[in-house]
Image: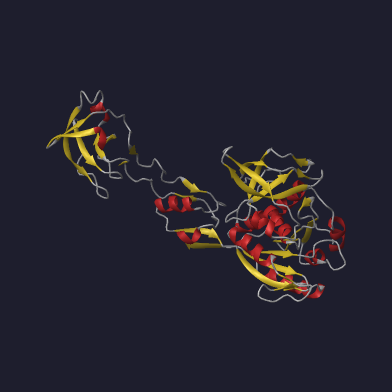
Amino acid sequence: MFCSWGERMDSVFMRVLPVGRALEIWRSALAGVRTTGIVRVDLLQGLGLVLAGPVPAAGDVPGFDRSTVDGYAVRAADTFGASESFPAYLALAGESRVGEPAPVRLAAGAVLRIATGAMLPEGADAAVMLEHSEQAGDAEIAVNRPVTPGENVVRRGEDVRAGEVLLGAGHRLRPQDLGILAAAGLASVTVHRRPRVAVVSTGDELVPPDATPAPGQVRDVNSYALAGMVAARGAEPVLGGIAADDPGALRERLASALDGSDMLLVSGGSSVGTRDFVASVIAALGEPGVLVHGVALRPGKPTVLAVAGGKPVIGLPGHPTSSLVVFWLFGREAVDGVAGVPVPPPGVPRHEPSVAARLTRHLSSVAGREDYVRVALVWDGEAAEWTAEPVFGPSGLISTLVRGDGLVRVPEAATGIEAGRIVDVYPFGGVGQ
């Protein structure tokens, strides 16, 4: 049973939680959000989408024994003891061509000329590379190096066995996955529909990018940067425009945006202030409402994490860098959950690609909060290693992310990281990250 809206807001409003605890609460909530509907799409259209069920192979891959080299199909036993001084002389019995069935069954003491990818004839169990043989006559081949059974060949079903599950439910399709599905004879796949993520910016000071700001106004950065992050995660961003600092208008705008999407991102107006009422409006969108408001994080402290009617809603800070870091930490998992990717259990670390680099400057922090510092990667040719150069600047400047290549995490318990230490740099903002 959920508590009332007032009770819930009293319990979570700007109650700053450690990042780890906020992630635990968020993951638990995401495990119950609505996933998108299921559709059947052509194989190429499935790239980046999430499988709705396991995909078994209809047949063996490859469907026949084949050679991996240009040369001669042989019975391996016929080559034992062969050398350049004492080659094994074998009768040439024909040729196996790519795309055609092997013409004969290979008899003892015979070879069949074969091309890479061509079918291995019955009776053969290996292939001799062309450079390890010589033409000894019109119908005789001299093999000057022995081979073992299975050498230079791929057996039927060695890649995939018929009935084997190629990919499981909840798997996001990558380019190599399309390849194995094509090899197994699948021209279409059943996947979750691409999520629609609404993006709304709030603030009377915001104007669209093509407008000339009046004194005191700024162009809307967050809508477009966040839309890019959403698209890079494989979802479809839906720009919901700029909402004014008016509770009624904001409530109407957010309700409409959420109704037409699978998830909602709201940037700006999430801190404590007389005009910062986004958290209250989010809480009124639907049950269970706001789960987290405030994370011990820099940048990104005034983060709001909520679920409304089975749909994730994230209130992000108005400063561009803060907004993007919060999406990187919390938004990606929400997009994945809606898309049908199983949410990792609380406490399981998220697998993140990273680059090991040597920190060039000391990073200061405050124990009790988790810091994410923008850094640029620079190759040190003399030391043959990457270095991480911090890019400092206020979170209101998006240029610090543009100049940087990734983020360095300063753990909650640390008061900093000393210069010269090797750190993990997490690439930021790239496609699929």
Task: Please give left or right for residue 60 compared with residue 312 in the image.
Answer: left
Q: Position of residue 91 (x, y in %)?
A: 16, 33
**Residue 320 versus residue 431: which sits nearer the camera?**
320
Q: Position of residue 401 (x, y in %)?
A: 67, 56
Task: Please give left or right for residue 37 compared with residue 417 in the image.
Answer: left
Q: Position of residue 203 (x, y in %)?
A: 77, 70
Q: Quadrant of the N terminus?
A: bottom right
Query: Which quadrant of the structure image shows residue 246?
Result: bottom right
Judged from this view, the residue extending furthest toward the front is 382
Color theme of the render: secondary structure
Q: Position of residue 132 (x, y in %)?
A: 25, 33
Task: Please give left or right for residue 304 compared with residue 120 in the image.
Answer: right
Does residue 371 appear anywhere in the picture? yes
**Residue 404 versus residue 22: which sits nearer the camera?**
404
**Residue occupying image coordinates x 26% and y 28%:** 145
Q: How many marks?
A: 0
332 is higher (above) or lower (below) than 102: below
87 is higher (above) or lower (below) than 289: above
Does residue 123 appear anywhere in the picture? no
197 is higher (above) or lower (below) than 177: below
Task: Please give left or right for residue 203 compared with residue 75 in the image.
Answer: right
